[in-house]
Image (tube, rainbow, N blue to C red):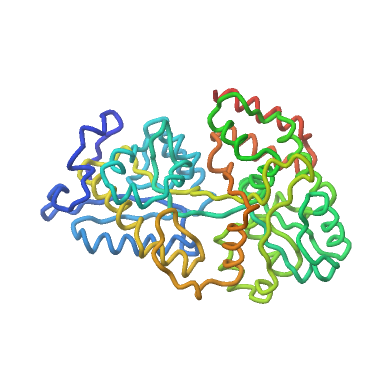
């Protein structure tokens, strides 16, 4: 299929036909099959694997002359491959992108803005929550359709271990949390399981919410807006780094925290060796299905904050971290079909019901009615936790920071945890890289 480099021409050139929703306004294909290439990270074991395949099947049934060719790439390889293809402007027609990738791809013209298409499709615009676009917006235009309303960075803990060491409820402040961790350590358990071999877990599943209790959402918004009001060297951010480091230096995290993977840290928790772990909602079905006896005693909580001058309480990440973008090399024949696929087959009741009833995850668009009886207790506990008045939704740094800043920050967190850098120096390093992006 001949490709057209549409990044060099205005999208308005394709208005009407290309962003139309109705089938009769799509280009007539005759017997020619239009192929749409697609690449993502959701291999067969991932929650999004099946609903995406189902969406493709429904789309192809309605559009028999269009074929979506899907390629799945394991996440670690994808995080290298996708940015390389983006830099070369060789992205597939549909490409999975996290927030950082979306902005990077958009800044170089490697993907197309979806904003005109969204504005022309009243149902699409109305149905997707406006907050969901934030992580995939560049210069006030949306460049990816988010796929999940993810919850990360909350805590799941083993209440049986807590009871064994004489703790009846989860601590409210960080000082109290340290005391509990010491009791758990003396009882022979790992207080906090962490696996950061992939660089993102210490941040995305732990520190992004941990630090928000110190700095608050207004601080993070200032960083993202680059308005000069907030700095990574601010005392609140440095204090959070110091407290996070203290958890490691006091032996409250497993010694191999930067050499094992996030999945391996899940094994420490599910085997009963660890009492506490930073969590992502996609892991709830794994826990329920693999270790039901541990799931039965697992409870949901938030990282405790400082006893004084906390800027937020009960912080957890509400993130639409990953979505689908449209590569700028897509042909004009394929483009309206790619738009239709995102707007009507991904954003759909079928997709949403599967995600909540089978994988216990929500989507960032209006949910249909679903069978709540299918949800395990830990998911119901998470829903109740989010509804508490002292719970605070916050950003996932992994999805919103510029790539170069994120690299210094995430690698720096590893150095921090093993005592190779001070909180003050890491804050300076992150701020220096941040200022280069201004």
Determine which quarter of the picture holds residue 436. Answer: top right
Query: Looking at the image, is 131 positioned above or below residue 366?
Result: above
Q: Nearer the viewer, residue 312 or 322?
A: 312
> Is 303 on the left-hand or right-hand side of 117?
right
The one nearer the camera, 388 or 54, is 388
State the residue at coordinates (61%, 73%): 290
Q: Looking at the image, which residue sits at the far left?
A: 30
Question: Quick check: 334 left or right of 195?
Answer: left
In this view, 156 is above or below 176: below
Q: Does residue 141 appear left or right of residue 201 in this picture?
A: left
Residue at 15% in and 48% down: 25
Instruction: Count every numbered label the image shows and give the total.
Output: 0
Residue that lies at the very extreme toward the front in this rendered image = 389
Residue toward you, 171 or 259: 171
- In the rendered image, the residue lying farthest to the right is 186
- Residue 203 is situated, as x and y percent measured from the top left of the image, at 64, 45
**x, y (%) of residue 420?**
78, 37
Residue 118, given in percent of the width and then of the height, sits at 31, 43
- Residue 90 in percent (x, y) is at 36, 38
- Is 162 displayed left or right of 291 in the figure? right
Locate the C terminus and report the quarter of the image it occupies. Answer: top right
Which quarter of the rendered picture does the N terminus lie within? top left
Query: Where 196 sits versus 413, above or below?
Result: below
The residue lying at 34 percent from left, 43 percent from top is 326
């Amino acid at each position: 299929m001949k490709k057209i480099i549409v990044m060099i021409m205005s999208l308005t050139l394709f208005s009407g036909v290309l962003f139309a929703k109705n089938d009769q306004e799509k280009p007539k294909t005759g017997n020619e099959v239009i192929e749409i290439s697609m690449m993502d990270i959701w291999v067969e074991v991932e929650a999004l694997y099946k609903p995406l395949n189902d969406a493709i099947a429904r789309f192809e049934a309605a559009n028999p002359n269009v074929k979506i060719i899907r390629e799945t790439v394991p996440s670690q390889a994808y995080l290298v491959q996708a940015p390389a293809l983006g830099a070369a402007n060789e992205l597939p027609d549909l490409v999975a992108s996290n927030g950082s990738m979306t902005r990077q791809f958009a800044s170089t013209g490697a993907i197309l803005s979806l904003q005109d298409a969204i504005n022309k499709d009243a149902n699409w615009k109305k149905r997707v929550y406006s907050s969901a676009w934030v992580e995939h917006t560049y210069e006030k235009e949306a460049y990816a359709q988010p796929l999940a309303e993810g919850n990360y960075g909350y805590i799941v803990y083993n209440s049986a271990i807590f009871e064994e060491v004489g703790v009846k409820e989860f601590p409210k402040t960080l000082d109290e949390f340290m005391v509990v961790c010491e009791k758990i350590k003396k009882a022979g358990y790992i207080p906090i399981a962490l696996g950061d071999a992939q660089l993102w877990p210490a941040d995305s599943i732990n520190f992004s919410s941990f630090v928000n209790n110190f700095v608050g959402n207004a601080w993070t918004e200032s960083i993202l807006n680059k308005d000069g009001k907030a700095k990574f060297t601010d005392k609140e951010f440095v204090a959070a780094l110091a407290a996070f480091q203290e958890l490691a230096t006091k032996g409250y995290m497993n010694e191999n925290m930067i050499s094992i993977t996030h999945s391996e840290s899940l094994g420490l928790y599910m085997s009963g060796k660890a009492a506490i772990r930073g969590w992502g909602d996609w892991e709830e079905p794994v826990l329920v299905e693999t270790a039901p006896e541990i799931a039965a005693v697992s409870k949901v909580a938030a990282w405790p904050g400082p006893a004084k001058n906390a800027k937020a309480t009960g912080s957890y990440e509400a993130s639409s971290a990953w979505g689908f973008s449209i590569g700028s090399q897509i042909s004009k024949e394929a483009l309206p079909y790619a738009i239709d696929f995102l707007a009507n087959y991904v954003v759909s009741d079928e997709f949403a019901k599967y995600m909540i009833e089978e994988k216990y995850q929500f989507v960032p668009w209006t949910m249909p009615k679903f069978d709540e009886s299918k949800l395990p207790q830990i998911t119901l506990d998470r829903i109740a936790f989010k509804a508490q008045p002292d719970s605070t939704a916050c950003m996932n740094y992994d999805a919103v920071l510029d790539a170069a800043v994120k690299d210094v920050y995430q690698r720096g967190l590893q150095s921090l945890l093993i005592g190779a850098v001070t909180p003050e120096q890491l804050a300076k390093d992150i701020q220096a890289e941040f200022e280069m992006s201004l």
